[in-house]
């Protein structure tokens, strides 16, 4: 469905995108994950024909985006990070406007707009000016406007930024429905939970390059990082567990063991605690997830 081939883009001799390549198969939910300034938005703008690359190619359904732009845009819906709505118009008018840009007019456009507004849960507010909407409501209308022409490929650039948890959960529901419908989705985010829960495949981008790619399981296997076992105990504040490298916080009575494959060591640790007379109050096993993989690769937090 989407083939990105060695695209690059520079601004004042600073490479924002540096020979990025990846493929997205039909029906795949692909997450482009990285910190702010990593090159996610520039990549989306290049793919969506907003900003031509300095080099490389983008093909959608086998069509070169910059050779047949008008044709390829019919396959593609774009949900930008910035809200692309007219505040003085209501939700219905906004959808009809965006639909008209793709040749959707008349009763067909009205049916599609009504369907989408009901789908995003805004049927009862469709005649209210967008300027009266909350941030989460605007995000949902923004998503609906990108679907007026029923595209097969949907590009979403951080669509849940700056909204409340309830609105974010609603958008998650809508994304799952799009996935069930078989839509192909390219989704940029810096939220770990989003990528872990929704993506079939993840590309980690940093400093304009994709530094790792694969499913969550593949990334975890390829870049093995340690889990943490945190034991809260009762008794001697200088307690250590023999045979394991650990740190002890005597104020909170916590022992932290950093170890790979924590689940395989848990029973042994519990047995050693019993033999040493360490009274366990609580054990918390924190498995290394996507953020740990990213830290392993880049040495910095995703939200830097």
Image (spheres, grey):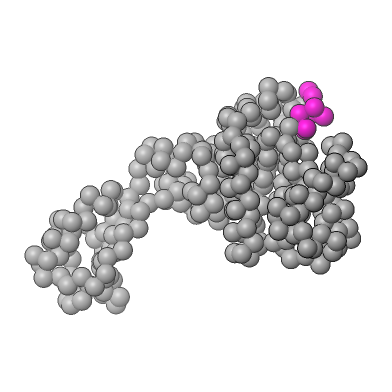
Residue 17 spot, x, y in % from top left: 64, 37
Left or right: 127 in relation to 195: right
Q: Residue at x 61, y 64 (%)?
A: 166
Left or right: 259 in relation to 117: left
Q: Tell me where residue 150 sits by quadrant.
A: top right
Left or right: 79 in relation to 260: right
> 290 above or below 136?
above
Residue 207 spot, x, y in % from top left: 58, 42
Q: Tell me where residue 45 sits by quadrant.
A: top right
Residue 65 spot, x, y in % from top left: 74, 27
Magenta part of the protein: which range? 67-74
Taking depth in this image into account, of 136 and 123 the one nearest to the observer is 123
Q: Main secondary structure of the magenta part?
A: helix
Q: Residue at x 59, y 42 (%)?
A: 179
- Which quadrant does the C terminus fall into? bottom right
Q: Residue at x 51, y 39 (%)?
A: 200
Left or right: 163 in relation to 70: left
Residue 71 colored in magenta in the image: yes
Is residue 233 among what the camera can see? yes
Q: Tell me where residue 75 sits by quadrant.
A: top right
Q: Residue at x 77, y 59 (%)?
A: 123
């Amino acid at each position: 469905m989407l083939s990105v081939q060695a695209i690059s883009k520079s601004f004042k001799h600073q490479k924002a995108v540096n020979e990025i390549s990846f493929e997205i198969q039909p029906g795949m939910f692909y997450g482009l994950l990285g910190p702010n300034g990593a090159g996610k938005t520039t990549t989306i703008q290049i793919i969506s024909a907003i900003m031509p690359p300095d080099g490389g190619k983008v093909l959608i359904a086998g069509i070169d985006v910059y050779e047949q732009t008008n044709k390829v845009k019919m396959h593609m819906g774009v949900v930008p990070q910035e809200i692309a709505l007219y505040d003085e118009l209501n939700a219905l008018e906004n959808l009809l406007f965006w639909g008209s840009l793709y040749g959707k007019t008349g009763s067909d456009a009205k049916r599609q707009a009504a369907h989408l507004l009901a789908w995003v849960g805004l049927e009862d507010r469709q005649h209210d000016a967008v300027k009266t909407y909350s941030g989460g409501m605007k995000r949902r209308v923004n998503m609906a406007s990108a679907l007026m022409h029923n595209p097969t490929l949907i590009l979403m650039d951080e669509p849940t930024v700056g909204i409340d948890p309830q609105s974010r959960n609603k958008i998650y529901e809508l994304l799952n429905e799009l996935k069930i419908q078989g839509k192909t989705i390219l989704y940029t985010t810096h939220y770990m939970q989003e990528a872990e829960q929704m993506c079939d495949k993840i590309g980690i981008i940093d400093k304009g390059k994709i530094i790792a790619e694969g499913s969550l399981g593949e990334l975890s296997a390829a870049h093995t990082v340690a889990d943490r076992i945190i034991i809260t105990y009762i008794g001697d504040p200088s307690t250590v567990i023999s045979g394991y490298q650990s740190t002890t916080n005597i104020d909170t009575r916590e022992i932290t063991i950093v170890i790979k494959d924590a689940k395989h060591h848990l029973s042994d640790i519990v047995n050693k605690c019993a033999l040493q007379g360490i009274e366990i109050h609580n054990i918390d096993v924190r498995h290394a997830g996507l953020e740990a993989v990213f830290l392993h690769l880049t040495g910095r937090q995703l939200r830097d």
